[in-house]
Amino acid sequence: MESKEQSNSSDSTNYERFDLLLITIGKHMRLDLSEMNELRVVDLIEMSKIYHGSKDDKPKEANQDDIDRLFR
């Protein structure tokens, strides 16, 4: 049976410095450190998901109306 620690180390998203990752996420959303300090970690992650969208979001396929609008 694989231990929980071993299964977590095989994740591709396992970060050693989670604090730096959170600061990077906040700075990418143009938050300053005092604004990030007011947020809970969960709130910062949820804001990031809203700001950046989920990985499943795909660009909308252009239809003829979109193409016509582009060339007006």
Image (spheres, rainbow, N blue to C red):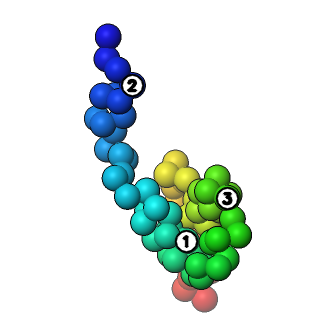
Q: Residue at x 55, y 71 (%)?
A: 26
* Tag in front: 1 or 3: 3
Secondary structure at badge 3 equals loop
Q: Is residue 17 above or below residue 30?
A: above
- The residue indicated by pointer 3 is 40
Q: Earlier in the sequence, mark 1 or mark 3?
A: 1
Q: Is residue 5 above or below residue 3?
A: below
Q: CA distance from mark 2 to mark 3?
A: 25 Å
Q: Earlier in the sequence, mark 2 or mark 1?
A: 2
Number of numbered discs:
3
Q: Residue furthest bottom?
A: 72
Looking at the picture, which amino acid does disc 2 mark? Lys
Residue 58's x, y, as percent? 51, 55
**Looking at the image, do the residues carrying marks 2 and 3 touch, with CB atoms under 8 Å apart?**
no
Which one is in front, 58 or 60? Answer: 58
- The residue indicated by pointer 2 is 4
Residue 39's x, y, as percent? 69, 65
Secondary structure at badge 1 equals helix
Looking at the picture, which amino acid does disc 3 mark? Arg
Q: Quadrant of the N terminus?
A: top left
Q: Residue at x 31, y 44 (%)?
A: 12
Residue 18's x, y, as percent? 43, 56
The answer to whether residue 63 is visible is no
Looking at the picture, which amino acid does disc 1 mark? Gly
- The residue indicated by pointer 1 is 26
